[in-house]
Amino acid sequence: MDALEALWIKGGGWSPWIFIACLMVVLLVATRIVHVVLRALASKAKPSQHVWRNALLVSLSAPLNGFIWVSVLTLAARAFYPVGNNAQVDSALPSLFQVVCTLLMTWFLLRLVNNVRKNMQSQLASRGGDLDQTAAEAVSKLAWVVIIASAVLVIMQTLGISIAGLLAFGGAAGIAVGFAAQNLVSNLFGGLTVFASRIFKIGEYIIIPGTDLMGEVRHIGWRSTLVMGFDRKPFYIPNALFNSSTIINHSRMERRCVEQTIHMRYQDIDKVEAVIRRGNELITAHPGIDQEFFVFRFDNYGERSLELFLYVFPLATGYVDYMVLKEEVSLSIARIIREEGGEILPVTSISMPERRPEAELDEHRAPVAAH
């Protein structure tokens, strides 16, 4: 920048308006050249093959054009306020230029983070894989925090603000702010816990026992997590809840469980042994049931029925497949009970006396005294 100002001072015989017109021409030509060159280079570096090169070229285009604009506008300002003519402009213009350049650099780095994430997703998709959205979200947000915090510190130093004094003030005010923002801080640490422990990720289904909160994780933010319920209603769950609650990750289950009590009549007790034997043969021969562990046995003498206990693990974890297998096994056992001559479910018999004829009722009625 000092070299460009020296060039302007050296050619001090020019009219400011002519100088500005020349700068505008240079600006238009330079931005056009930058756009064409970077676009051509980016088109050769495919996102799925050159992750970082493509992200760098795509991210650089707009901030670099912004830097050219800022440089030209700064030189144009010098055309009206040459060095040494205005002390305020001489002191403010360099600092303003550095602040704007810092913002442009911050913009470039944030764009770079986003484009690298997109390119990595594209690369994995071309190879048949998928990017872990939860981990990518965590790394992206952490990078954003570091970049923005660094930019704020650089800008404060440029403007002459003492960081040491700010930290001293923050130590005194931090206690009051901490009490006021304890919920915000707890939610922030809850989000960091989710990112670090990876108890669930975007696209998985979770359940919080003891509440009505369940559904698909759509977004994990710094303050709350968006969960789309099974009834398609969104839940915005504070992240602090994940530090103190039990979470069931429904998507990571290894097996579903069919657990049922099947009731038979007491008069069918002689048929229970055959039903149990045929039921176990049915389960053993079924290709959709985990054969490592299953139970189908006589369990208990109930108050009104004999109780058979069924406990099996289907191999499929999908809800529809689970319901189909549950229906198939239940109906098959019911069919076996019927074929053996038994009856399923508790059967309660209610005995009511037959209605007596009116003539018989009249004989038992008490005589009514005549008046």
Image (cartoon, rainbow, N blue to C red):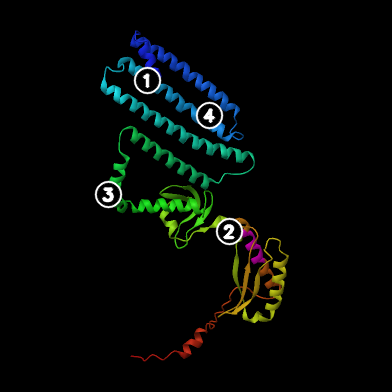
For the point 46% across and 32% down, the residue is: 108
Secondary structure under the numbered disc 4 in the rendered image: helix
Q: Amino acid at mark 2?
A: Met
Taken as a whole, is the magenta stretch helix, strand or loop?
Answer: helix
Asked whether residue 238 appears in the rendered view, the answer is no
Where's residue 243, x and y in %?
Answer: 44, 58
Residue 57: mark: 4
For disc 1, the marked residue is: 73
Which quadrant, please, contains the N terminus?
A: top left
For disc 3, the marked residue is: 172
User: Is mark 1 in CB contact (under 8 Å) with mark 3?
Assistant: no
Q: Compared with residue 24, is residue 58 higher up or lower down, i.e. above or below?
A: below
Front residue of 155/128: it is: 155
Front residue of 289/76: it is: 76
Q: Is residue 284 left or right of residue 61?
A: right
Where's residue 132, x and y in %?
Answer: 55, 46
Q: Select label 2 or label 1 by which is in front.
A: 1
Between discs 3 and 2, the one toward the N terminus: 3
